Image: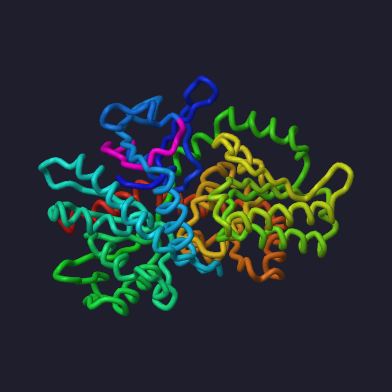
């Protein structure tokens, strides 16, 4: 397994080392699979105590409480991380692939660091490969060049890559100055996965336009320079049973009681949102909808609180600083406009929330809003469903998420259409308990069946079939 983000981070806290799980949908989803299968997970070591916890081979066994697999860390200099991760990955590829109207920034220096980082990860992988034919499972857009590099050294390797974000249409992708290198790198894979068929079709169309390749649309494959790459959709999911089981624990119930007292939430209609503070997540849009909802439905003032949990993300990138400032301004303006002496409509918690607390917020809420402007999947929607063990919540879900293709009992919303958004919020609040329960039970059946293990099995089955 290869990813930029590591599933466990070791940090110094005063004179003690603590191990935390990052707020990453990717790592939270894939960790259960690695626990079940074992193996080596290769990732960037970003924690302040990461170097102090590895052996001479840069490895540490995880999870700490019950080690099941090895985590091998790759070290990047500050300049390498700045250019490869913050630069090319997140100022160029991220906005290029998300239709959120943020202009990509293409810098030659970032591209050079991106290439260098891909080579560094390739070296770490090749160190772990034995004589037997290896299976290498590559995650996401940080490693578009990696499959080709590995194949040049080990043509026998089975390389599978899952692209967790959307793939844009050819018209959008063509502006990338290094489009050919990226496409050729990805075609080093034996199998390339996306969340939904639409993204597969966009990728095949892009290759057809930019390279002298032979797309086989009937088999959903591409033949390039004599090599075949299969392109398939595999909607990612979560460990439903583990989340549902944890959500029923007494600790979650007690945490919910504590949070309700701390934030004066007793007796309120509660909405919740859990997002990284990213311009693709539609946070200002949902705040504008809440503002308009209270304008049009003043009877809900002092009865309604929306809790936004916002994990800080990539804060020194200018576009992220801008969205943070916009979010802060929106919260301050809307709360000032509607507040009374002991009530404000929006509770904004800008911090990494412990998983137990997040489950407590899910459990206490009447509805959850996922308002992404564009999202490959969005696992918050599925986490919310898994946590609602009493089937007593409503999911409001953006049409522009991959999850909307599966979760057909959610209330769908266009986050750009304010009047529709407001009516959807009102509909969620005023829905009868019987309808709430019916919809949530159906959603829980879907996510329970289509869990992370089914996702992994589908990918592995296709890989075995190819080999």
* Front position in the image: 93 or 262: 93
In percent of the image, x 66 and y 41: which residue is there?
Answer: 364
Judge whether 95 appears above or below 161 on screen.
below
Image quadrant holding the N terminus, namely top left
Image coords of residue 108 (percent x, y): 39, 63
The answer, for residue 356, to whether it is visible in the render is yes
Q: Quadrant of residue 247?
A: top right
* Magenta span includes 251: no
Judge whether 331 appears above or below 404 on screen.
above
In this view, the residue farthest toward the left is 131
Q: How many marks?
A: 0
In percent of the image, x 31 and y 77: which residue is there?
Answer: 210
Q: Quadrant of residue 40?
A: top left
Image quadrant holding the C terminus, namely bottom left
* Front position in the image: 442 or 311: 311
* Magenta span includes 41: yes
* Front position in the image: 203 or 77: 77
The answer, for residue 239, to whether it is visible in the render is no
Magenta residues span 35-48
In percent of the image, x 16 and y 71: which residue is there?
Answer: 225
* Front position in the image: 254 or 144: 144
Judge whether 334 appears above or below 175 on screen.
above
Image coords of residue 426 (percent x, y): 73, 61
């Amino acid at each position: 397994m290869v990813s930029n983000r590591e599933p466990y981070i070791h940090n110094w806290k005063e004179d003690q080392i603590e191990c935390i799980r990052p707020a990453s949908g990717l790592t939270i989803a894939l960790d259960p699979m690695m626990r079940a299968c074992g193996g080596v997970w290769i990732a960037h070591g970003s924690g302040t105590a990461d170097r102090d916890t590895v052996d001479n081979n840069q490895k540490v066994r995880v999870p700490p409480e019950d080690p099941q697999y090895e985590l091998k860390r790759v070290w990047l200099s500050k300049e390498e991380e700045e250019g490869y991760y913050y630069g090319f990955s997140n100022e160029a590829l991220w906005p290029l692939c998300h239709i959120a109207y943020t202009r990509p920034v293409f810098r030659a220096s970032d591209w050079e660091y991106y290439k260098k980082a891909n080579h560094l990860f390739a070296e770490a992988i090749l160190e772990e490969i034995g004589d037997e034919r290896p299976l290498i499972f590559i995650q996401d857009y940080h490693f578009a060049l990696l499959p080709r590099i590995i194949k040049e050294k080990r043509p026998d390797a089975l390389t599978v890559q899952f692209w967790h974000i959307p793939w844009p249409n050819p018209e959008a992708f063509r502006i990338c100055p290094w489009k050919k290198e990226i496409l050729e790198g990805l075609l080093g894979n034996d199998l390339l996965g996306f969340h939904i068929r639409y993204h597969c079709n966009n990728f095949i169309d892009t290759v057809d336009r930019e390279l002298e390749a032979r797309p086989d649309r009937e088999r959903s494959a591409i033949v390039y320079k004599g090599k075949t790459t299969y392109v398939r959709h595999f909607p990612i999911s979560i460990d439903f049973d583990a989340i549902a089981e944890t959500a029923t624990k007494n600790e979650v119930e007690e945490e919910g009681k504590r949070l309700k007292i701390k934030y004066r939430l007793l007796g309120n209609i509660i909405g919740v949102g859990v997002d990284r503070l990213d311009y693709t997540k539609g946070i200002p849009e949902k705040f504008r909808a809440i503002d308009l909802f209270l304008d049009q439905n003043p009877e809900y003032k002092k009865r309604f609180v929306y809790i936004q949990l916002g994990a800080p993300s990539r804060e020194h990138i200018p576009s992220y600083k801008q969205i943070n400032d916009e979010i802060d301004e929106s919260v301050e303006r809307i709360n000032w406009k509607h507040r009374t002496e002991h009530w404000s409509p929006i509770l904004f918690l800008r911090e990494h929330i412990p998983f137990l607390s997040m489950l407590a917020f899910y459990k206490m809420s009447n509805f959850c809003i996922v308002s992404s402007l564009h999202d490959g999947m969005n696992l918050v929607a599925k986490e919310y469903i898994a946590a609602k063990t009493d089937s007593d919540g409503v999911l409001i879900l953006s049409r522009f998420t991959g999850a909307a293709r599966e979760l057909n009992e959610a209330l769908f919303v266009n986050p750009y259409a304010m009047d529709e958004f407001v009516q959807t919020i009102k509909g969620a609040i005023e829905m009868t308990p019987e309808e709430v329960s019916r919809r949530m039970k159906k959603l829980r059946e879907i996510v329970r069946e289509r869990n992370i293990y089914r996702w992994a099995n589908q990918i592995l089955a296709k890989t075995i079939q190819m080999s």
